[in-house]
């Protein structure tokens, strides 16, 4: 480690949590899957419900992609506060706040889209469900393939960061 000219040691950035690469993979693969579901949904929705099915599949898939992204992004943002004295409170506040935003956003969208003539409720529902189930599968696969130890960010007594 090099020292500054004034004799002080350089400040080290806080260590990146071991969950960060996992959450980035969840975002990446989840959005790829959402693209695949959107294409399949547009094709099937177009066949069975015409242009209304195409728009419904896009909206349902977009909703699923946004909801899956909010959770992973909130944890990635909250992880930036590691090392702060208020880390635990900020972390849970950000994550819980994002879940509340997701819930309210879902209710608002469900009410707004409920009786629209340009929406096929079946196609919208099926594409949204496919996105939710697909995101759960992506989460499971990424978690199983990650090499995160059971105790990931633990420090031994006397061990410096």
Image: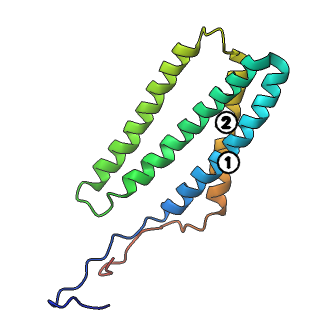
**Residue 124 position within the rendered picture, expressed as x and y whole percent measured from the top left:** 68, 22
Residue 7 percent across, percent down from the top left: 16, 91
* Viewport quadrant of the N terminus: bottom left
The residue pinned by badge 2 equals 131
Residue furthest out toward the left: 6
Label 1 neighbour load within 10 Å: few <14, some 14-19, many 20+: few
Q: Is residue 60 above or below residue 32?
A: above
Rendering quarter of residue 159? bottom left
Q: Quadrant of the C terminus?
A: bottom left
Tell me the distance, in whole angstroms, between the alpha carbons under discs 2 and 1. Answer: 11 Å
Q: In this picture, is 89 found above or below 8?
A: above
Q: Residue at x 60, y 68 (%)?
A: 147
Locate residue 61, reporting x and y percent: 65, 32
* Secondary structure at numbered mark 2: helix
> Tag 1, which secondary structure?
helix
Which label was assigned to residue 118?
none
Residue beneath disc 1:
32
Q: Is disc 2 surrounded by few (<14), some (14 to 19) or many (20+) residues within 10 Å?
A: many
């Amino acid at each position: 480690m090099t020292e500054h000219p004034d004799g002080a040691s350089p400040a080290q950035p806080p260590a990146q949590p071991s969950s960060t690469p996992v959450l980035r993979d969840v975002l990446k693969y989840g959005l790829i899957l959402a693209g695949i579901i959107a294409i399949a949904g547009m094709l099937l929705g177009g066949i069975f419900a015409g242009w209304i099915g195409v728009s419904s599949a896009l909206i349902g898939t977009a909703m699923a992609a946004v909801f899956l992204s909010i959770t992973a992004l909130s944890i990635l943002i909250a992880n930036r506060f590691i090392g702060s004295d208020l880390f635990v409170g900020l972390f849970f506040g950000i994550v819980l706040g994002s879940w509340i935003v997701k819930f309210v956003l879902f209710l608002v969208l469900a009410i707004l889209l409920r009786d629209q003539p340009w929406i096929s409720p079946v196609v919208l529902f099926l594409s949204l469900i496919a996105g939710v189930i697909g995101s759960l599968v992506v989460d499971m696969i990424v978690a199983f393939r990650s090499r995160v130890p059971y105790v990931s960010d633990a420090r031994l007594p006397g061990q410096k960061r």
